[in-house]
Image (cartoon, rainbow, N blue to C red):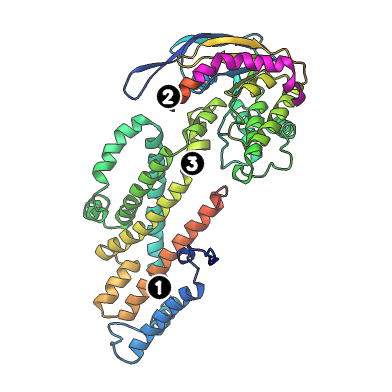
Amino acid sequence: MRVVVERVSKTFADRRGRDVVALSQVDFAVEPQEFVALLGPSGCGKSTLLNIIAGLLPVTSGQVYFEGEARPGRPTSATVFQEFALFPWRTVRANVEFGLEELGVSGIDRIERTRRYLDMTGLAGFEGKYPHQLSGGMRQRVGIARALAVEPAVLLLDEPFSALDAQTRTLMMDELLAIWERTRQSILYVTHNIQEAVFMADRVIVLSRRPGEVLDVVPIKLGRPRRESQQTEAVFVQAADRIWGMIKSQAQAALLEGEALSERGV
Amino acid sequence: MVVERLIVVDRTAFLRRPDYRTVRVLALVGLLMLWEAITRTGWVSSLFLPAPSGVLAEGYDMVRSGQLFVHLDASLARLAWGFGVGAATGISVGIAVGFFSLADAVVQPIIAATFPIPKIALLPLLILWLGIGEASKVAVVALGVFFPMAINTYAGVRQADPLLIRAAVSFGAGPWSIIRKVVVPSALPMVFAGLKLGAGIALLLLVAAEQIAADSGIGFLILQSGNLMETTKLMVGIVVLSLLGVLSHWALGGLERAVIRWRHT
């Protein structure tokens, strides 16, 4: 199924009760099997948009819909959270099973699907561990496996690797790409990191700072499967430069303003 | 020029708190020995302060004659019922009030108004309503346990990480799933803190109720022994209460470790 975001606007009331426009008339779609990055400076409302698509926040106007062939037992979306959001009282296996439980998948089916996604994310051998016994990278693997296991129409990733150290992040990006190559699971990947977005995505949707509007949609014409060596190719460098040119002044403005308003806005 | 060498020393040494295990044991043993010595030398009459050895012997006799168990059984039954009913209702109300804002609006002011009442003051009323039998004593214990349980569970539920709740919702969880799979596990540490608090309050109210209106139970035993100047028996009752307190705390601690296996410590 394709995800369509149609003229979505979101307005929050800040602490003094004044209206703050977080998103304004945002329009785009994610096609089946596509890897789309949603990029913007901090405070552009990209996480807000992701939450709206996940059904975790109401829109002020506009709508989000999924269209295409509905497959029963498949949720429209599943989210991988920046802060992992694993259930500390559940083992790795039980965390991955959570979405399947809620979907009503039971018995041998649940066991097999859990097994498949534990293996795919490199968690075999860690099934019985609790989240606090794992490193950050391993925890986010659990987060990814939990979301993949429900086989959603679109996988939403909200800055999934920004809480990890630089080396782990690079490895995790490679693994996510490998998983995408295998499953062709459509992905909407929120990030503020230009290199990350260009390296991974088919298209990069660039959002402006408040009010968040689509500044541009940049197609990335890099071959697949992606390799780190491509980061020095002209196509990569040009795309990254073009995006940086668009958001540099906005990032500077964000820097001066500081953390005046939380991006989550809740 | 004189070359000096300034060696860096650990300046936090005095902050360290070593674990004096032997001192812990010696302190308790020392107190008992001092107590024994005071009564043995006749410095204090055993009518007012019986020696630990005497209390132990009396306790042994009461166990053999079965006299102790008559009282202990009566007390334990009241404790179990009162604690069970109070904890179960307290936890249920705490979850409902913590999760549903309508329940919060209805119950919160009622709890705020009734919580400060010393529960033992309600015993005469409870006796009027429920009779002089077991029900009134069970009820006063249950009331005493209910409030800390409800308040602690409520706090535990309110502390549940909103991110985890959102994550559960994103995977399709409805309100009952959220309560069962996110809210209750989140609140468990606070629930156990409440259970430990409640166990102490239960013991306190039980003894008070048994000293006001009962013809059995450890509280009754202590009161009656006092009236008859049977100080040794009285002391046996007090020792039994102390053991009950310690044992319930241990048992709850063990249960907590068994249930909350995911804790870091």
**Image quadrant assignment for residue B66:** bottom left
Amino acid carrying label 3: it is Ser
Residue B221: where, in percent of width, then height? 32, 71
Chain for numbered disc 1: B
Q: Secondary structure at mark 1?
A: helix
| Residue appearing at x 38%, y 73% in the figure | B239
Q: Nearer the viewer, mark 2 or mark 3?
A: 2
Amino acid carrying label 2: it is Glu
What residue is disc 3 on?
B186
- Badges 3 and 1, same chain: yes
Chain for numbered disc 2: A
Q: Secondary structure at mark 3?
A: helix
Residue B101: where, in percent of width, then height? 36, 30
Among numbered discs 3 and 1, the one appearing first in the sequence? 1
User: B59 above or below A198?
Assistant: below
* Crowd tier of the residue under label 2, counting other residues whose Cα lies within 10 Å: few below 14, some 14–19, many 20 or above: few
- Badges 2 and 1, same chain: no
What residue is disc 2 on?
A257
Residue A239: where, in percent of width, then height? 66, 14
| Residue appearing at x 69%, y 20% in the figure | A185
Task: Say if the magenta span includes residue B55.
Answer: no
- Please give the range of residues in magenta: A227-251
Q: Is residue A264 visible?
A: no
Q: Secondary structure at mark 2?
A: helix
Choose between B153 and B237: the one closer to the eye.
Answer: B153
